[in-house]
Amino acid sequence: MVRETLSRILREAGREAARPFRDADAPITAARPAPAAITRRRLIGTALAAGSLASIYGAGRAAAQASGPFSLPPLPYPEDALAPVISATTIGFHYGKHHRAYVDNLNKAVADTDFANKSLDDIVKATANDPARVAIFNNAAQDWNHTFYWNSMRPNGGGMPTGMIADHIKDSFGDYAKLRQEFVTAAVTQFGSGWAWLVQDQDKKLKVVKTANADTPMAQGAICLLACDVWEHAYYLDYQNRRPDYVNAWLDKLVNWDFASRHLAA
Ligand code: FE2
């Protein structure tokens, strides 16, 4: 029904996607697009507002031309929407070059394999501990991680969490200040490239973890709530070697608590 609804909206606008949706069940839930977003994103936003589309991940997959089963999902906001915390130049390279390269390389890596017919989530989990599938895992996980990262941010985000996730933070960390301290420490001390995460573990407790390179907590069964990319390509054009400044600004001005809340398990 979700696919039918979005397809109908797109058809009516003369912008029907060229390929059928294949990943609509993926658990990554996108933030509502900014009002200034392009027309197609407004259409997707209309579907979201109507409560008919739990995720635009599948729609995004269908939105871009691809040379394989996977395609670059749309950003949930314009490239300049996070400035000045993250510049349009950084987003342009990070999304348009780096993320796109992961998607392109994933398509090449799964060509003529059984993985070409699997969901991105299933590929990440199936290849996470397989030394023979490192190339597939790295590109699949980086595709997944980056999509989660874009949605972990929003224009005019940051600040104190509210609602249900605030209760979980108090229960797991004592207060937001402790969570914030742990998150900054994880992000700053991740040696080399990697990620800082807020996750909900199988015991329902929230935890801060860090992963190296393409590694992702979702492959180990954790529910991801927030992801902060600490690869240098995420911040170096704007902050050079000042990773702490990037991480602090990310938390204070960009973090999308609504997105994190939507992934909480009761
Ligand atoms: Fe990145």
Image: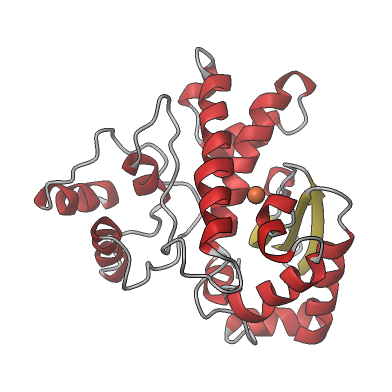
* Residue at x 32% of width, y 70% of height: 36
* Residue at x 29% of width, y 59% of height: 44
Residue 20: quarter of image? top left
Q: How is the image coloured?
A: secondary structure
Quarter of the rendering occupied by the C terminus:
bottom right
Which one is in front, 153 or 115?
A: 153
Q: Is 53 above or below relative to 113?
A: below
Residue 52 horizontal side relative to residue 186, left or right: left
* Residue at x 73% of width, y 65% of height: 239
Confirm whether residue 189 shows in the render: yes
Which one is in front, 125 or 100?
A: 100
* Residue at x 74% of width, y 45% of height: 220
Q: Is 7 above or below relative to 139?
A: below
Residue 71 horizontal side relative to residue 179, left or right: left
Rendering coords of residue 136 (x, y %) = 64, 26
Rendering coords of residue 28 (x, y %) = 51, 54
Rendering coords of residue 35 (x, y %) = 31, 73
Residue 157: quarter of image? bottom right
Confirm whether residue 201 shows in the render: no
Residue 153 horizontal side relative to residue 22, left or right: right
Residue 246 horizontal side relative to residue 146, left or right: right
For the image, the number of numbered tags is 0
Rendering coords of residue 232 (x, y %) = 74, 52
Which one is in front, 223 or 212?
A: 212
